[in-house]
Image: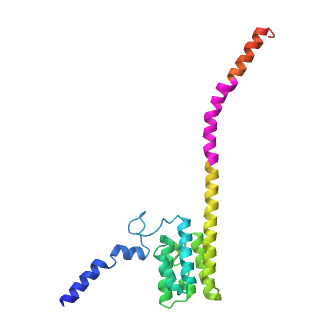
């Protein structure tokens, strides 16, 4: 009896606590603070690296459910939730079309474009038998390309927005130090020559 009590105490101390279980179920315990080991939700490069991990796992011959569970450990929170759900359902023997579908309307509204594309690829792969690893690797490359394009566009917008205030600062100085002395000098010359 005492060995059972010791094992129970060890399981309670070492095992997942209620907050970790709630976080894994998709319920955020402390809003704004992602669980340990997760990247920010808005980082497209974190999604791309998670897709790369999934592609490598699948390319190495792992089962889809095992690869999804392994990728979920380091994926951003939204993607990790969907990967864990798919891995759990696939492990239990659910239909892949059900396992790779959006779990509910409330979560479906928060799914970003790369995650939605991954869900569509996985469903298509399950129904057609096409290799998922290559498609996921291409999706990761596309996400990186889109992130680079968005960063370039943001940098160009920032350059335009920075130039406007600088122009407003330097234009009066240019007028006061460059144009006014020339006009004053010409006006003085014109007045002295008696033209006017």
Span colored in magenta: 159-179
Q: Is residue 9 left or right of residue 75?
A: left
Residue at (64% x, 70% y) in the render: 142
Q: Is residue 80 left or right of residue 149?
A: left
What color scheme is it? rainbow
Quarter-of-image position of residue 183: top right
Q: State whether residue 61 appears in this view.
A: yes
Percent coordinates x, y for residue 75 in the rendering: 49, 72
Percent coordinates x, y for residue 157 in the rendering: 63, 51
189 or 81: nearer the viewer: 189
Q: State whether residue 111 appears in this view.
A: no
Residue at (38% x, 69% y) in the render: 29
105 or 74: nearer the viewer: 74
Identify the image quadrant of the C terminus.
Answer: top right
Which residue is most to the left?
Answer: 2
Is 134 one of the magenta-colored residues?
A: no
Which residue is most to the front?
Answer: 60
Figure label count:
0
Residue at (63% x, 56% y) in the render: 152
Is 174 one of the magenta-colored residues?
A: yes
Say if 101 sits above or below 156 in the image: below
Percent coordinates x, y for residue 138 in the rendering: 64, 75
Say if 85 sits above or below 106 in the image: below
Q: Main secondary structure of the magenta part?
A: helix
Say if 150 sits above or below 77 in the image: above
Q: Is residue 77 left or right of residue 192?
A: left
93 or 57: nearer the viewer: 57
Quarter-of-image position of residue 140: bottom right
Q: Is residue 76 left or right of residue 23?
A: right
Percent coordinates x, y for residue 122 in the rendering: 59, 82
Which residue is most to the right?
Answer: 195
Identify the image quadrant of the N terminus.
Answer: bottom left
């Amino acid at each position: 009896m005492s060995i059972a009590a010791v094992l129970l105490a060890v399981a309670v101390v070492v095992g997942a606590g209620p907050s970790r279980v709630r976080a894994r179920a998709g319920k955020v315990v402390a809003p704004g603070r992602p669980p340990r080991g997760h990247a920010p939700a808005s980082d497209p490069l974190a999604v791309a690296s998670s897709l790369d991990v999934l592609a490598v796992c699948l390319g190495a011959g792992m089962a889809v459910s095992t690869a999804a569970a392994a990728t979920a450990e380091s994926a951003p929170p939204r993607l990790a939730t969907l990967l864990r759900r798919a891995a759990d359902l696939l492990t239990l023997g659910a239909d892949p079309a059900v396992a790779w579908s959006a779990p509910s309307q409330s979560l479906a509204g928060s799914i970003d474009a790369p995650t939605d594309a991954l869900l569509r690829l996985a469903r298509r792969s399950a129904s057609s038998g096409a290799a998922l690893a290559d498609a996921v690797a291409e999706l990761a490359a596309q996400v990186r390309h889109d992130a680079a394009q968005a960063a370039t566009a943001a940098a160009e917008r920032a350059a335009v927005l920075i130039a406007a205030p600088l122009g407003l600062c330097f234009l009066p100085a240019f007028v006061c130090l460059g144009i006014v002395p020339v006009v004053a000098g010409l006006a003085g010359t014109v007045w002295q020559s008696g033209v006017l």
